[in-house]
Amino acid sequence: MTRFIFITGGVVSSLGKGLGSAALGALLQARGYSVRLCKLDPYLNVDPGTMSPFQHGEVFVTDDGAETDLDLGHYERFTGVPAKATDNTTTGRIYTSVLQKERRGDYLGATIQVIPHITNEIQDFIREKDGTADFVLCEIGGTVGDIESLPFLEAIRQFGNEVGRERAIFAHVTLLPYIPAAGELKTKPTQHSVKELMSYGIRPQILLCRADREIEEDERRKIALFCNIDEKKVIPALDVSSIYEVPLTYHEEGLDDEIMDSFNITDAKAPDLSTWENIVKNIKEPEGEVKIAIVGKYTNLTDSYKSLNEALVHGGIANKVKVKLEFIEAEVFESENPEDYLKGANGILVPGGFGERGAEGKIKAVQYAREKKIPYLGICFGMQMAVIEAARNLCGIEEAGSTEFGPCEESVVGLMTEWVKGEVKEKRKTSTNKGGTMRLGAYPCHLEQGSLVHKVYNADDISERHRHRYEVNMAYREGLEEKGLKFSGLSPDGKLPEIVEHKDHPWFIGVQFHPELKSKPFDPHPLFVSFIEAAVKQGRLV
Ligand code: GLN
């Protein structure tokens, strides 16, 4: 029997609901249950693929090629369950589907309305998860009280009513702000938020209260009393120094016990939290430190590189070192000397990116890493810039560039119009829509024997997730290889370059895919483990 936990948020946004849901998923797994996590996003975009990382943070890509909300990354990182396209939906997607059905005539002349058509469509999204795991955790994006959230709240209310209290509960995440003048945490916003939720017919069984300091017994009692919730189920969710502590702190505060109690589960196993204890121990007691410079574009919003930051932390866990990240706006290298910024770095990373702005600066960062023999990891755009750098500075092709930046004489990186997915040939015209038209999702890659990546992965064939429109042009392969830039990973048909590496460099790898999307704290990605290991070695040399 599948049980459902719906997670809503109140008071303010950015409360870490996604992280909380993911940590709860990990806790349930630690008790031996299977879990599936999904997210309902109230915004109108069909998917977050066209949203700027500045606005919405990173776009997370699933194996099956969906561009999804970054919370799915948290889910996967905490539970290890690969996220699927069907784990995320948005108002835009729900409406698209309802309107398509209307055009097809599926509703047989009915007047199409938010209730019941939209709410039923939302419930179908939830219902299709029934039977897929012991627990389905379903997070509702946005904040209770938003106009956009209403159909979602109505849908989960109806769903909860239909399946009954034994199978569906509601957890609400709120904030207790600290007011210095009063010297206390305030419970009123939480009371109002719960009241709002109740006005939609949803009474939460569990309250997760975010706060930056201890919540006194009195305050808990007050919340319980005014929100009509069992006191033990008013759970403090205090700030922690590492996100990987969250499953442990939630457990200490009794969250999993109270979830069991809410479902009347009396025979649950005690959780085995040793994996999380080890991870936290490695993070808190590092034996050293490395500095990694990330030369990118969206550097002032850390959420833009969420998975990347985490994958680097995972690489640090595996090497028992703290990874200090330094974000550098690539554009500064267009007027300033990279040396001034990169001198102290033990590793340089150019992450994924779109558009021309900052590209020249990134190419300079690549050149610096190559010439100074500093470990370099180029991801997607970072690989493309590494190839352009080699074409210009090693092969002497001065005009080397990418057609992403406009027409170009020497398109070392060019638009992909045709590629093979499984048995099918995917084609794209240069003029099609921007949304959902990239090479997306998991693709196999064959690694060359004897190469650095072969050693890193210790495998002949791998599968990694992609999200890009442009591709390194095979026509330049020979010339580049002559100068030492090896194409050490290719698509199985040998047509698409997936990995490049410099032969005469201690650690220089560029990958066309996004390895960070698959890294987990309990299963760090080999590229990040090896990159950080190389950075540690570099640190010993200086
Ligand atoms: N803008 C590049 C492309 O579309 C790289 C994309 C990325 O880094 N994810 O190919």
Image (spheres, rainbow, N blue to C red):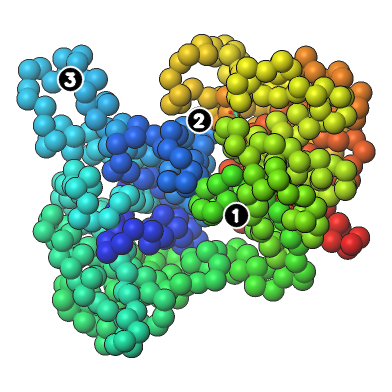
Identify whether 51 is placed above or below 21: above
The residue indicated by pointer 1 is: 310
Give the residue drawn at x 16%, y 76%: 226
Identify whether 13 is placed above or below 284: above
Give the residue drawn at x 54%, y 33%: 63
Amino acid type for the residue under numbered disc 1:
Glu
Q: Is mark 1 within 8 Å of ligand 1?
A: no
Q: Is the Cβ of the residue at disc 3 closer than 8 Å to that at disc 2?
A: no
Amino acid type for the residue under numbered disc 3:
Glu
Residue 219 is situated, as x and y percent measured from the top left of the image, at 27, 83
Q: Earlier in the sequence, mark 3 or mark 2?
A: 2
Report crowding for label 3: few under 14, some 14 to 19, many 20 or more residues within 10 A (C-alpha): some
Looking at the rendered structure, which numbered label has been put on residue 182? none
Total residue callouts: 3
- CA separation in Å, label 2 and label 1: 22 Å
In this view of the protein, can residue 205 be seen by the observer? yes
Q: What SS does tag 3 mark? A: helix
The residue indicated by pointer 3 is: 102
Give the residue drawn at x 59%, y 44%: 297
The residue indicated by pointer 2 is: 64
Q: Is the Cβ of the residue at disc 2 closer than 8 Å to that at disc 1?
A: no
- Of residues 364 and 542, the one drawn nearer to the viewer in this rendering: 364
